[in-house]
Amino acid sequence: MTTWLVNGQRDGRLSPTDRGLAYGDGLFETIALRTGRLRFLDYHFERLVFGCERLGIPVPDTDQLTQELETAREDCTDGTAKIIITRGVGPRGYRPPPAALPTRVVGVTATDASVKSVWREGIRVRLCDTRLSENETFGGMKTLNRLEQVMARNEWRTPDIAEGLMMTDSGHVICGTASNLFLVRDDTLLTPSLERCGVRGVMRRVILEEAERLGIVVQRPVVTRAMLAAAEEVFVSNSLQGIGPVTAWNDERYGVGELTRALMAGLAERGVQECTAG
Ligand SMILES: Cc1ncc(COP(=O)(O)O)c(C=O)c1O
């Protein structure tokens, strides 16, 4: 069950003229609620503020959002929280109204805390046909425009495939449908540059911090299919699942690599229980 608040109102309604609905004119965040804590909430807010500033949407009051998240979660301790910020309602036409009043939607869905992570032991991935457009105006942001991911995720129905990797228009491997991508080669951690495409994941940020703490060399190159095929370790990440080591891709099989394990242990110490061993 999900408890929703719209502009602070329980079960409040969204207007059909909301620009989030009409044009995808807005942003969202998906946050893990674990043992009563909204994990890395400050990082989610930083990305939301960065997106609002880029899109020219008035920055929401994060204290108010925190309060609303607390109200929506009631006594739920484990689940998924979501924040949607749109530019608000407006007249017909693309032109943003000069004095837009953003719409805030906050929701919390309870999940069963006893269910173990489905990613930790390794996942099978596929390479999707749907490509991602490159546009540096939107690079890194988590906007409401997710049709590319929707089409990519609709390419497969078999439950044995956990995630689909996506390529850009120019044929570079960039991310998963709902995750960031990492490769390991020659003791170096590689993650695609997100200047022109992709979402700057909160878990990606935590992984890069852990890599720095562990003294792992990090590069943010343009990643080709050949680099993916030649990688010694491959994993994906997101806020809800932590790290998903890629153990199967096409007919290839991999073990969970050493560097991946070290990063998972680091994340587990920072409260990402999905990465806890055993
Ligand atoms: C397209 C895309 N990229 C990356 C991510 C990972 O972001 P985060 O670590 O903030 O969950 C997500 C998460 O849903 C996503 O949808």
Image (cartoon, rainbow, N blue to C red):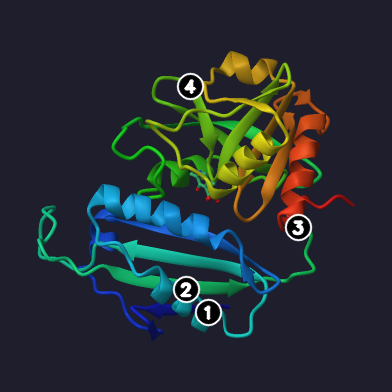
Image marks 1 and 3: residues in contact by CB distance under 8 Å? no
Mark 4 burial class by Cα count in 10 Å: few <14, some 14-19, many 20+: some
Q: Which of the labelled discs sits on residue 70, or is there none?
A: 1
Label 4 lies in ligand 1 vicinity (Cβ under 8 Å): no
Mark toward the viewer: 1 or 4: 1
As shown in the figure, which amino acid type bears the numbered disc 1? Glu
Mark toward the viewer: 2 or 3: 2
Question: Tag 3 or tag 4, which sits nearer the N-term?
Answer: 4
Quadrant housing the N terminus = bottom right
Image marks 1 and 2: residues in contact by CB distance under 8 Å? yes
* Horizontal and vertical percent position of residue 86: 29, 62
Q: Which of the labelled discs sits on residue 172, or is there none?
A: 4
Residue 82 as seen in the image, left or right of residue 39: left
Q: Which residue is mark 2?
A: 66
Mark toward the viewer: 4 or 3: 3
As shown in the figure, which amino acid type bears the numbered disc 4? His
CA gap, disc 2 and disc 3: 22 Å
Q: Residue at x 41, y 41 (%)?
A: 140
Q: Which residue is mark 3?
A: 273
Residue 258 as seen in the image, left or right of residue 134: right
CA gap, disc 1 and disc 2: 6 Å
CA gap, disc 4 and disc 2: 37 Å
Identify which residue, 244 or 267, lies in the foreground: 267
Label 2 lies in ligand 1 vicinity (Cβ under 8 Å): no
As shown in the figure, which amino acid type bears the numbered disc 2? Thr
CA gap, disc 4 and disc 3: 32 Å
CA gap, disc 1 and disc 3: 21 Å
Secondary structure type for disc 4: loop
The part of the image, by quadrant, that contains residue 185 is top right
Q: Which of the labelled discs sits on residue 41, or is there none?
A: none
Q: Residue furthest right?
A: 278
Question: Tag 3 or tag 2, which sits nearer the N-term?
Answer: 2
